[in-house]
Amino acid sequence: MEYVDQPAAMDAIYAEAEQWHVNTGGETIHAKRIPGRWRTFKWVASSVWLVFFLGPYLRWDGRQAVLFDIPNRQYHLFGATVLPQDFWMLSLLLLFFAILLAVATALAGRVYCGYFCFQTVWTDVFTWIEEKLEGNPAQRRRLDAAPASFSKFRSRALKHLIWVLIGFATGFSFVAWFYGAGKLWSDFFVGEANAAVYASVALFTVGTYVLAGWLREQTCFWLCPYARIQGVMLDPTTVVPTYDEQRGEPRGRMKKGETEGNRSTGDCVDCNQCVAVCPTGVDIRQGQQEGCITCGLCIDACNSVMDKIGRPRGLVRYASLDEIEGKPVPAMFARPRVWVYGAILVIALSGIMYGFSTLAAIELKVLHERAPLFVQLSDGSIQNKYTLKVLNKSNDDLAVRISVDAPVPVVVVGAEEPIAAHHGQVTPAMVFVKVKRSDLDGESMPLTFVAEADLADGSTVTTPRESAFFGPRP
Amino acid sequence: MAENNPFPGENNTGHFWDDNLRELQNPPPRWWMIGFWLSVAWWVLYSILYPMWPMPFETEDGEGYTKGILGWTSIKEYKQGVEQVQAVREQYDAQIADMTAEEILQDPGLTQYTLASSKVLFGDYCAACHGSGGQGNPGYPVLADDDWLYGGNLTKIAESITNGRKGAMTAHASILTEQEVDTLANFVVQLSEGGAGSEADWELYNAKGCQACHGAKGNGVLAELPNGDIVTVGAANLTDSIWRFRPGGYESAKHTILYGVNQVGVEGTRDAVMPGFAQLGQLDGKLTPDQIKMLTVYVHQLGGGQ
């Protein structure tokens, strides 16, 4: 085998490695803001978060429309009240969103990161404020480098104050979903809310300020697990912001006197605007990479330059790797992955809808006494003891009537009076069932307890619960 | 080495191997360093706030460690938890102290509280003989049925718990002939199965003095008072299908007739003694009147209280 001069062969690789710049936060990214279609779309998508701030003030039936009342273990969602017993629906909801994340990523990349994620949205708002107070990126870099002075301190102080206030508003709004907005406004500022409320608001204030003000894209690079998970859900058919290498290379600056007809360069004029506008400081021309949150701002930047120099738009555009390489691109709905993801979405969603449509106002649990399993009475009949647990999920106290369905005649003792079931609580009751020995033809027989109550709106709700009756060996 | 560094300006340590393997001294990311110093700060703060450092000497309360300025200890937290539970229980206990057992049963909430908290008392004092759910044991009566030799209303149950019970039945081995024992044993089996018994059987029953304790009808009732209470001496009800001494039936009945109940010096005699729980001698402590009241409600609700 011929000897290969390995160090020399490696030098080219090392030389290339030197070009790679890993963003570890040593330098603050000051991204340029350029108007455009995706910039507008990002604002529209971000405004979904207004629901987070305004939602707690929505009213329904005289109370907060959506309130997660943890101390009372009641979760009000408009007309419905969900108790911890119904929490299996939450797992379906989480499944739904997890798959939604997967399907969106498989089709169009990190849509969530680019347009909806609280980290990127809050960072966007924070840097917008920074731009309003401290000027464009060049001015901000100068201010960063400037020696400490009173005017620097003044503009910085105002910025940080506004950041902290936004952080506080974030924490305050978050807690309002759990504590009740009206109560929070009246308790919080006079020191009457509990320690958990103050701790949560403080944590959110500091967290928002540090994450959106200081860590910014570093969160996406080094802290966020979603960023990494989403990155592996892409494939060559996924549509993401892509630099059209075929069209752009070889890149080169425009020279005076060079016409469109005789230029030797590709469409890329190497103006670096795509890098200048990137909120995570990556160069899209190096291809898809972990720092890219697919926000599309580089598309806006490139298009604005192309418009100026009269070349067609779309040098950087939403495109799949297959499309750039000239491979045939199947229609989105010809891909099995879309259908599988879609099916899981539909199943999860129908499960949630089934859950909400069958939320019964009362729930009955029957615990059969085990020691003793049965008792023989002096008249020879057999008695079983049951503990009933009636859960009243409605908003009113109910009188719950109990009856027993059995294949043989039974005598029920202890359920003569309706059970007074307090709303939102479990009320226990003890019931005895007697059966004549001669009516029993086995060691056990099925038995159904039926709880029935008249609701405040005049309707009647019925909940059956199966149990069993035990006796001695015949 | 530094003077002939082939990779100048890349911040390496000046250590090289195989031409181009070298050690760099890049700093860790800033967020990482911030996290590191924050956790160091937390560690210092923690050691000031909470108990942390072992000490070579013992302080006045015998503990060899730094206390921390918050004064937190796990045992203190536990005691606070217990106090909270007791504060909740005290409200109920105070109510129950001023009520009779009948009044407690009128209130579903208090009844539930009584049943839940007396479960522990029942387990400590009653379950050893009567079973964890009142299901009884051989020789010890079932409390979950409706057969009460001493009466099953609240007053009688309270009386049984307070003073205890001791049954008595003469050993008839030397009083009756083998034939008579056989006849009577068959007679009580017949009664328990719903039979009426022949005239001759009833004659023998009365002639041998059985009715003195088991009553004229054989149901253990000596007299019925105008208020509905019954007078008994605790003798078994022979006419129901429940046997005081298991397994019941002919042999069992014969044994009881021959050797009696609680007969001193009689080998094979049945034991039927329940201690009085208001003045327990052999057990540690005794039940307070309130505890007896709660146990009364508990036993009454086991399945057959009258």
Image: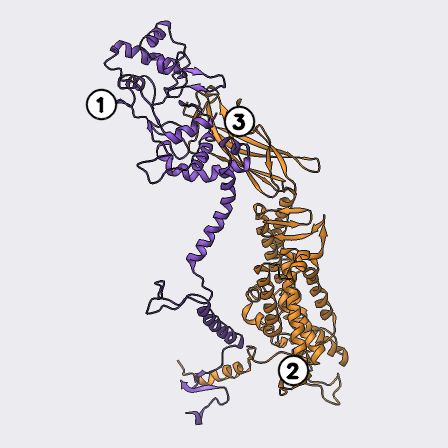
Tell which of A46 and A378 is nearer to you. Answer: A378
Residue at the far bottom: name it.
B3
Residue occupying the point 40% across, 15% down: B222
Counting every numbered tag in the picture gives 3
Look at label 3 and name its amino acid.
Answer: Val
Name the disc covering residue A153, or none. 2
Look at label 1 and name its amino acid.
Answer: Gly
Shown in purple, the chain is B
Q: Is residue A326 visible?
A: no
Which residue, given by chain and number where applicable, does mark 3 sit on? A413
B134 sits left or right of A198 in the view: left
Give residue A409's position: percent from left, percent from top: 53, 22
Q: Chain of mark 2?
A: A
A280 sits left or right of A12 in the view: right
Give residue B79's position: percent from left, percent from top: 44, 54
Give residue A41's position: percent from left, percent from top: 72, 67
Q: Chain of mark 3?
A: A
Q: Nearer the viewer, mark 1 or mark 2?
A: 1
Chain A tint in image: orange
Which residue, given by chain and number where applicable, does mark 1 sit on? B265
Give the Cα distance between marks 3 and 2.
80 Å
